[in-house]
Amino acid sequence: MKSFRLAALLTATALAVPMATMAQDEAKNDTINDTKEVKNRNVMLNASSDNQPRQISIGLPSSLSATIYEDGLPVSYNIWPCLPYLYWTGSAQHESMGLMSLGESAIKNGAVNYAVLSKTRRGKDKFEGHVNYTTNTYNLQRFDMSLAGPIANGWSYSLGAYTNLDPGTNKLADIQYATDMKMFKAALSKEWNDGRGKFNLFYRYANNKNLGDAYGPFIYVGDGSVKEYNGFRLGKDGFLPGNGQITYLDVMTGKTNTITRKGGVHAMNNSLTANLNYTFLNGMNLDITSKYNYANNYMVSMMLAGTGKATAADGYTYAYDFGGHKAGDVFEGNYNSRYMLRDIGWTRNWMTTAELTGKSKDHAHSWRIGANFWWDREGIQANTGVYAHTIEANPAWLNHNGSQEFAANTGGEYYDGHETKLAFYASDDWQVTNRWWLSAGVRGEYYAMGGKNAMAYLNATDKTPTYAENVRGLNYSVNNGKVTRYSNKWFNPAATINTRYTIAKGFGLVAEYVYAMQHPNSQDFAGPYMPILDAVNIHLGRAGIFWNTPWMKLVSQVSLIQQSNYKSRTQFTNPNNSSDVVTIPITNDVQTMGWTTDVVLTPFKGFTFHGLLTLQSPKYKNFDITANFSDGTSKSYNFNDKITTGVSKTIIELDPSYQFDKFRVWASFRYQSKQYINKTNSLYFNGRWETFGGIDYNMNKHVGFSVNVVNILNQKGCSGSIGSADLVEDVSAYKNYLMAGSYIRPFTVEFAAHINF
């Protein structure tokens, strides 16, 4: 169920906008020269959530979360099961924030993606404080504070507190707050030898209850557009029952448990980070960062699993008294199915990164050597099931054949694993001539992993039970059979080369190549069969021009990115019977060709405009499946050269900003063209704009105010999937089709006050 989980969690808990001041970066010469960080990208502007960083498309399927670095190390060792955004948010406690470039991410992390970079405020030699308060038209209450000051003899401190009480825009009947997050930080700093030596010790505690549910029903018209269903207000009405009780079969024991959704969600994190930075007399700099991280994540996700229409003979009844109906009354009509994921995940890891940097005597070379030693223990118990409720605002749970849960643990997971990454990397930025600049880096990673799990099948293709005939995907539980141990060791290389050649003043050529290899991690061993162990290879190549003038910085490039062996477990529905669903482990490649132009304009004082245009063609490659359904039908499908689902072919970003006197007016407009719903490319959602804007007013150097608007155009931004349509080519049955999906935040006005002292 990994791909189902990926798509659903992305839409359920995606990413938005407290830090509008990051919307533009002033035009600087390092638009080209800086290869380590990426400018002019709205890190914290997200249309779906207001306290998480957005993910930036590079033409490959998105991950569950953005990769987030804090103080030189990842917030979470793995993205799953402890998602990094549960323990991190942009706040006054950060002194800087940006994006790690694709090449830098490959060298430092072995992955090709943009990663958020953040640094916690260090101690100061003079007392200073920063206090932020944010509210919005839906009664958000967010308090954010950071204090720093001296102690004595080069020692200093910083303290931070953050609390976010967000009821959400759609008032859910079973909870008070969609997000209830509290985070506390403390830092102790020491400087010596005239500031050449610096030591920092950071502590973070985070506690988060993330209970939001950004889903709702609507009518899919059939031409890419949607319309309202039965008066349901997307973004305003809740689509979960007020009775939050969930009954499920425990994946560990096979016994029945009952919890409330509110009581079953809790993410907690303690981390301690030590950093030593020392600059030697010869100019070389040594930076060592080490962190111990302790995190738990208890989750109850109610993801969408499709809609249906029940007759009296289908076995659906009301689970309790509701709207004039008695518990046990037969239900007839439209219902919505939910795929419940009751995850209990944990991680304990120790990560250390060391870097030594320096320059050659003639300053032509800026070199770096580094090492990672990362160790992780983690595990998961994933309980799954399907549930049904009525389709209306604040609906009611339904029972099916007398039970709230059905298809129990068909996606059940369990593992208790450990991983070790020992990596060495090196890079060099070389000014070869006055016109030619070259940067190159390599990484070699020894990756060992192992642990124990409970597999019901021998492997992903030969589903021969390895134990207990009653674990063939139905009511799967760990105690049904023996626990199996697994162990693997791999070598993961990565490399990047980046060059620039100046033809004339301010004008020249740029080119870049990035490569990374990855192998399965512990999560891949969580399911009921052995995963496919083939390596994932990612290649990115791009080339183009740059053009710099006193009022313009422009880069325009063509690119090709490929990822092999993209692995997922995907549900396919029998086109002849919507209740006949099979889960198939699939492996395919993805390839995207594109053209991107990024420009920053500063035509007159105070005005900055950032624009980005991406035209791309993301396609499946080597994607052949055979679906065998329970009614005996079998059909093979070839999705080669089909456009990947959920990825747009055209992306536009427009970010104007104007600063005058004590005011700053800004806006950000992002466009995504149509996205395909199914792999046959026969159904799609129309393109949409995501719009933001605001006014900042600095009364003086101590006090400022801002008013921000989210979703200025009040678009619905609907997206989702129709499982029964993934294999269909004749879409006549999907005109004016009732479905449920996700949406972006409705029109929202935010108010913020900032105090600096």
Image: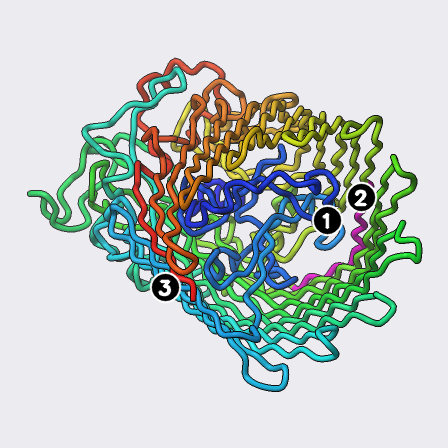
Q: CA distance from mark 2 to mark 3?
A: 40 Å
Q: CA distance from mark 1 to mark 2?
A: 8 Å
Note whether 57 is above or below 112 in the view shown.
above
Give yes or no for contact between labels 2 and 3 (Cβ–Cβ under 8 Å): no
In magenta stretch: residue 487: yes
Q: Along the polypeptide, which appears first: circle 2 or circle 3? A: 3
Residue depicted at x 44% and y 37%: 666
Count of residue discs: 3
Q: Position of residue 216 (x, y in %)?
A: 30, 37
Give yes or no for contact between labels 1 and 2 (Cβ–Cβ under 8 Å): yes
Note whether 656 is above or below 457 in the view shown.
above
> Which residue is disc 2 drawn over?
496
Q: Along the polypeptide, which appears first: circle 1 or circle 2? A: 1
**Can the viewer see residue 278 in this picture?**
yes
The image quarter in which residue 192 lies:
bottom right
Crowd class of label 3 (few under 14; some 14 to 19; many from 20; radius 10 Å): many
Query: Which part of the image, by quadrant, shows the C terminus?
Result: bottom left
Q: Position of residue 57 (x, y in %)?
A: 58, 36
The disc labelled 3 sits on which kind of residue? Answer: Thr
Which residues are drawn in magenta?
485-497
Q: CA distance from mark 1 to mark 3?
A: 33 Å
The disc labelled 1 sits on which kind of residue? Answer: Glu
Q: Is 453 on the left-hand or right-hand side of 355?
A: left
Q: Which mark is residue 104?
A: 1
Residue depicted at x 35% and y 51%: 705
**Between 47 and 349, the one nearer to me in the picture:** 47
Q: Position of residue 332 (x, y in %)?
A: 18, 33
